[in-house]
Image: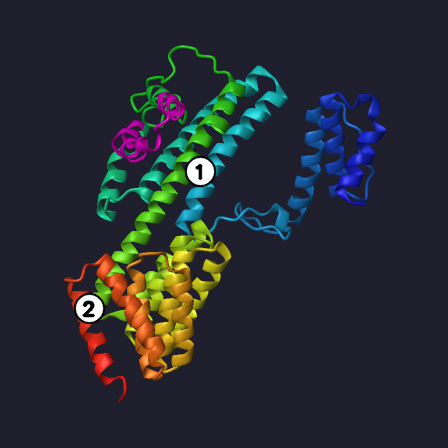
Amino acid sequence: MDNMQNMDNILSSESDKENDPEENYRNAIKLLFHNANGRKKAEYFNTPREATEAFYGYMFGEHIAANESDKLFAPSKYDDANAEIKGNDSSSQFYDYISGYREAASLLIMNALIKGDTRTKDELIFPICFLYHQYIELTLKDLYLYYSNDSEEEKDKFIKKTNHKLIHVWNEKIVPMIKPLFVEESEINEFNLIESYINEFNNLDSDSFVFRYPIDKSRTLYHKTSQKINLPALMEKMESQVEDFFAYTSAHLDIYKMRNDVNNYRIKALECIENEKYDEAVQLYNKALELKRRWNGDEHSDVIFLYIEIASIYTMQDKSTEALDFLSKALDISIRINNSVFLSTIYQHMGMNESMQKNYLKALELYEKSMEYAEEDDSYAINTYLYAARVGHTLKDFLKAKKYYEKAMFLSNKILGSNHIESVNLSKEIESFNNNKAD
């Protein structure tokens, strides 16, 4: 019988008490205890605390008995008893630290409230506040280190200088970086609210010592007057308002970072093309493409555009097979999203590469497909007609060649003007064609 059936059976057997939250909590713990210890009948517990202690007492007993090591930090043979500190992964560790401090603080609050006695709440308030302070500190530093455009040297200097001061990181680095994200009145109000929380933390514990030690280095008490703190309200603000704010901020900064990284890759790729470092250019474009696909999915115009740009680099190197491979990927997406501009461009590029391979009939077919999707008075279509005319000439299909030369000339005069250098050169090419088409 699976967990859901067990839960249904337990809760249905207590239907007369189904509106009692404490009773449902006991029943849930009974189910956990039953699943963990199938050899014994689940016990009935009178309070949530009793049920929790029984369950964890059993689980700890099993795992402690199975631990053959005399070390503090040793693994268990039971995977569900092990926690893992992931090595050599700064992004994962930052997330685990941040999430761990926040969740630990909230769990301590829940534990204090379940126990209910004043002593537990008064003892746990110190680690609770320290953990929430550490959560905010690491989140702010993570935002700065990951999204800031500062150099690595500048980041090192700032982190060393700021120590644990939340307000320094917030005012000097985070506010200039994220405040432009908050433009609507409701967003500005949210920003101001979180800023007030950070100021409140700073006023209460500016150096992250107040909740770690009862006294400072001169043995003066940090807390000279009593203060009461609403634990449920504190947890609600940290878990919803603060966490939601940081999630919103990270999501928007991710988009800006992605766009910035893509633009940088493209700029560097163009520099490589100018220096004829084509392989490096392709690598950079592929990095940009990977980012775009990750963030926007495959069916996005930027993804199509990058496929075309990579294909163009292969075309420059006379690597038409590789170019056609990337153009085919762009074509599939353009057909799915029915983008006529891209379809016209892709078919033209495919025609060029088929022509390079001397597949002239296929090239002419593709140029004509490009014409079908070309917009009226599209300057890009001038070259499509011109390339089709040249292929027609090569195939000695002079009627088609003449037809497409005339369309190219008409568009060039209309869009660029008859005196434009391209119109003048095209006119000369057509004159040469007319004089030599019989050859």
Going 54% across and 48% down the picture, which residue do you hit? 71
Place of residue 309 in the rendered image (x, y in percent of width and height, measured from the top left): 33, 63
Using the image as rendered, state which of residue 232 and residue 49 is in the foreground: 232
Using the image as rendered, state which of residue 170 and residue 227 is in the foreground: 170
Going 22% across and 71% down the picture, which residue do you hit? 276
Circle number at residue 275: 2
Question: How many C-alpha atoms fall within 10 Å of the one at disc 2: few (<14), some, or many (≥20)?
Answer: few
Q: Is residue 416 magenta?
A: no
Q: Is residue 178 magenta?
A: yes
Which quadrant, please, contains the C terminus? bottom left
Quarter of the view holding residue 250? top left
| Residue that badge 1 annotates | 98
- Residue at disc 2, secondary structure: loop
Amino acid type indicated by mark 1: Ile
Magenta segment, which residues? 167-196
The reply, left or right, for residue 293 in relation to residue 23 is left
- Main SS category, magenta section: helix
Amino acid type indicated by mark 2: Asn
Per the model, the C-alpha gap separating discs 1 and 2 is 45 Å
